[in-house]
Image (tube, helix red, strand yellow):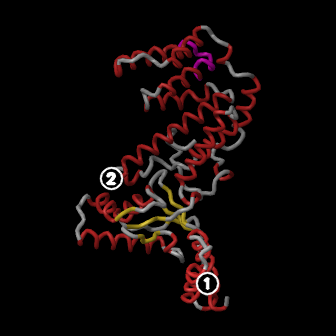
């Protein structure tokens, strides 16, 4: 124990020796032991311990340390980090990095340039234990993050929970989870790097997940008795996603509940014409059945009074209540854009 406290090098060797001498220590257990030794060594040397880095891609790329932005350098370093984050905890080969960032074939000069960029990024991310963040691996590099360090991991977890709660009919809890997840968004995904070709698939995937979360949140709020409160937002969403039938159905339901039956039927007629003109298709069975229910004024379209009460009660709580559900530093949101945020 004295060796580990007083000599960082010997302490590291001691941890390595334990792995070699005890076959029962698995790679995972060894990694935890190594981190424990390193933390003790740093503490004994009086080093300042920073909190874990936080990585954000749900908006412009950002890295925070103890709530403060980390300076990442130029666009090349930022693009490199974005590519590593898209494949967080996975090996990204040198060839992938070269192809993604420069489009060149592998050459010694390209490899050298990539190593320089990685070295600069590693210095930016240095946290007293930089090997735990950006590691060199055979053939490439691995950016190691825990789920609570990456905003997209938090968002995907809240989205999954919210949709599961929606399926079982717990609209209030579903709405809370989905609002929290949407509250992590600061604008379009990777907005400052959106022109980079290699990021396009991930940007499209994240935007589709965001829209799925928005539609799930609206379904939950409709289940809680919302009506006219959602019309303005839904009209904007329909304008941005004209062929998304689910949004059009939600708008029809909200209009009908707000006493605007004729407007709800107009939305259906416009949808039917658009589908035929653009795709040569008729509206889905679900949308046709919704139109029929509106024509017949089915009671099931009207929220029960208890649901209206639950909706009103839920609005007494701040929509951006993600701090109670996720651990993420507060940062500016694009509150003027109704499509982002909750």
- The location of residue 321, given as percent across then percent down, is 66, 47
Label disc, if present, on residue 41 of the rendered structure: 1
Q: Which residue is mark 2?
A: 196
Q: Residue furthest front?
A: 23
Give the residue at x 46% y 45%: 206
Measuring from the top left, give residue 209's x and y in whole percent.
50, 41
In the depicted structure, whether residue 33 falls above or below residue 105: below
Q: Is residue 246 magenta?
A: no
Side of 308 relative to 128 (left or right): right
What are the residue bounds of the magenta stretch?
A: 254-262
Give yes or no for residue 255 being in the magenta stretch: yes
Q: Locate the N terminus and report the quarter of the image it occupies.
A: bottom right
Task: Locate residue 11 relative to residue 97 in the image: left or right.
Answer: right
- Relative to the observer, which residue lies in front, 105 or 237? 105
| Percent coordinates x, y for residue 99 in the rendering | 29, 59
Q: Residues within 10 Å of mark 2 (few under 14, many from 20)?
A: few
Please tell me which residue is depicted at 55% across the width and 44% down the height of the picture.
Answer: 341
Cα separation between marks 2 and 1 = 42 Å
The answer to whether residue 332 is above or below residue 256 is below
């Amino acid at each position: 124990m004295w060796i580990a406290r007083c000599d960082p090098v010997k302490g590291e060797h001691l941890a390595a020796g334990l792995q070699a001498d005890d076959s029962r220590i698995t790679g995972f257990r060894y990694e935890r032991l190594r981190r424990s030794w390193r933390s003790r060594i740093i503490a004994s040397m009086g080093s300042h311990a920073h909190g874990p880095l936080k990585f954000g891609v749900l908006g412009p790329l950002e890295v925070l340390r103890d709530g403060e932005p980390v300076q990442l350098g130029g666009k090349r370093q930022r693009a490199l980090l974005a590519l590593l984050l898209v494949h967080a905890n996975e090996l990204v080969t040198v060839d992938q990095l070269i192809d993604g960032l420069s489009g060149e074939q592998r050459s010694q000069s390209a490899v050298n340039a990539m190593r320089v960029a990685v070295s600069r990024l590693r210095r930016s991310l240095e946290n007293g234990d930089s090997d735990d963040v950006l590691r060199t691996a055979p053939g490439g590099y691995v950016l190691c993050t825990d789920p609570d360090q990456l905003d997209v991991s938090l968002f995907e977890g809240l989205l999954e929970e919210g949709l599961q709660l929606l399926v079982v009919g717990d609209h209030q809890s579903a709405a809370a989870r989905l609002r929290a997840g949407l509250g992590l968004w600061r604008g379009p995904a990777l907005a400052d790097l959106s022109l980079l070709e290699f990021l396009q698939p991930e940007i499209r995937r994240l935007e589709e997940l965001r829209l799925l979360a928005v539609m799930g949140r609206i379904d939950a709020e409709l289940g809680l008795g919302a009506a006219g409160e959602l019309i303005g937002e839904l009209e904007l969403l329909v304008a941005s996603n004209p062929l998304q039938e689910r949004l059009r159905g939600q708008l029809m339901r909200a209009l009908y509940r707000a006493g605007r039956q004729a407007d709800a039927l107009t939305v259906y007629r416009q949808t039917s014409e658009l589908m035929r003109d653009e795709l040569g298709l008729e509206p889905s069975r679900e949308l046709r059945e919704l139109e029929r229910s509106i024509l017949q004024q089915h009671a099931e379209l009207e929220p029960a009074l208890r649901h209206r009460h639950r909706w009103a009660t839920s609005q007494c709580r701040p929509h951006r209540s993600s701090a109670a559900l996720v651990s993420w530093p507060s940062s500016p949101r694009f509150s003027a854009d109704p499509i982002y945020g909750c």
